[in-house]
Amino acid sequence: MKIGFLITARLKSTRLEKKLLLKLRDREMIRWMTDRIKQSEILDQIVICTSDNIQDQPLVEIAREEGISSFCGHEDDVVERLYEAGKYFGLDYILNITADCPLVSVEYFDTIVSTFHETKADLIRCLDLPHGMYSYGIKVDALRQVMEIKDDQNTEVWGRYFTDNDQFKVTDLDIPGSHQRPDFRLTLDYAEDFRFFEQIFDHFGGDTYKTPMDDIIQFLDDNPDIPKINIDCKQKFQKNWDSQNKMYLKK
């Protein structure tokens, strides 16, 4: 089975302009994310999965410089982009999350894949991890099936195609209580999020990308003022997410 990690990435952000190119310790955020993902030994391919819009070409260049792959697909149809990338690289199974999660939990990659072998689930989620640390496991063939039934080309919110259709098997990982930290937000959408990451990178330095999630969680527990930096962003993000979901449900 050929496994790839597809990083969904665009440079269209309006809340925090070109957030993936913001630098910590003179290195762009997306490079820190690729550094972290490279720690996994189960991946056959790492792909920055972006669009064919000219504004996203810096991401293609970064992929080349980092020695990983890139794929340019549909601007808005994320399902199509992921499926076509999976097909292009001959992948059977993909792990996926958006590029604003530089500290995604590499430790759970193996768990997702082993759970797939046990369950053959079309979609595997670990949403009880802190926001920004979880990722998804998806069968490429399941994306093909979604392509056949989807009713929109704007599929940024694509999970509903799996959860609202009984032809797909969705499995949620059982996350230990010590990793269930809804009070922590480790994703980059707002200026406050960037300031939050600055504190983590200042502490762990150039080895931040190698730092286990348990160490990051412990650091945040030991420094409770740091999670407070972007705590209000959770509500802003959720409001925006709910608005997107309502828009799609009306279609």
Image (cartoon, rainbow, N blue to C red):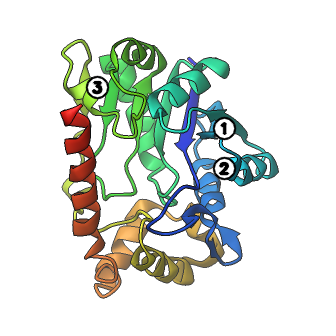
Res 128 seen here: no
Q: Are marks 1 and 2 in contact (CB under 8 Å)?
A: yes
9, above or below 192, in the image: above
Q: Return the disc, 1 or 3, that comes first in the chain's sequence.
A: 1
Residue at image mark 2? 56
Residue at image mark 1? 52
Q: CA distance from mark 2 to mark 3?
A: 26 Å
Residue at image mark 3? 161
Q: Amino acid at mark 1?
A: Asp
Residue 50 on image: x %, y % = 61, 41
Q: Residue at x 19, y 25 (%)?
A: 164
158, above or below 100, in the image: above
Q: Secondary structure at mark 2?
A: helix
Q: Residues within 10 Å of mark 1 (few under 14, many from 20)?
A: some
Q: Amino acid at mark 3?
A: Tyr
Q: Amino acid at mark 2?
A: Asp
Q: CA distance from mark 1 to mark 2?
A: 7 Å
Q: Secondary structure at mark 3?
A: helix
Say whether residue 116 is left or right of residue 101: left
Res 224 seen here: yes
Q: Quadrant of the N terminus?
A: top right
Looking at the rendering, which quadrant does residue 86 occupy? Answer: top right
